[in-house]
Image (spheres, grey):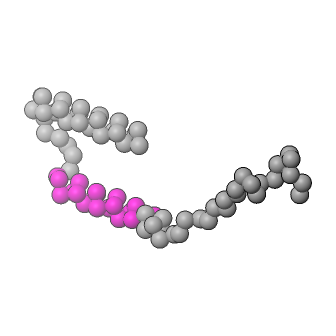
Amino acid sequence: MRAYLLSLLLGVLVGLIYAWFGIRSPAPPTIALVGLLGMLIGEQTPAVLERLSTPPSSVAVVHPADAPGPDRKE
């Protein structure tokens, strides 16, 4: 997550520098960026759906009274 935040902040910084010098960004038009966002969402959707559809694993709960200990004989 840290890498994404750093990437976003550096992108904003470069955008500000471009604006300061009046340089037009060589990035593709907004419609292409929206398409890339859609591709990323589509790429991540199967993994998210799989996590949501898989029931949580059952976890055995051991109560302290049932747990073997140094004073209990098994």
Q: Considering only vertical position in the picture, is 53 above or below 3?
A: below
Q: Which image quarter: residue 61? A: bottom right
Q: Which image quarter: residue 42? A: bottom left
Q: Is residue 59 left or right of residue 50?
A: right
For image coordinates 29% across by 34% down, the residue present is 10
The answer to whether residue 33 is visible is: yes
Instruction: Give the image location of residue 40, x and y in percent.
Output: 34, 58
Q: Is residue 22 left or right of residue 12?
A: left
Instruction: Give the image location of residue 7, x and y in percent.
Output: 33, 39
Which SS type dominates the magenta stretch?
A: helix
In front of the other: 66 or 36: 66
For image coordinates 39% across by 65% down, the residue present is 45
In front of the other: 59 or 55: 59
| Quarter of the C terminus within the rendering | bottom right
Instruction: Give the image location of residue 18, x and y in percent.
Output: 16, 33
Q: Point out the residue furthest to the left here.
A: 22
In front of the other: 58 or 36: 58
Q: Which residues are magenta?
A: 29-47
| Quarter of the N terminus within the rendering | top left
Residue 52 among magenta residues: no
Residue 46 among magenta residues: yes
Instruction: Give the image location of residue 22, x and y in percent.
Output: 9, 32
Q: Is residue 19 left or right of residue 59?
A: left
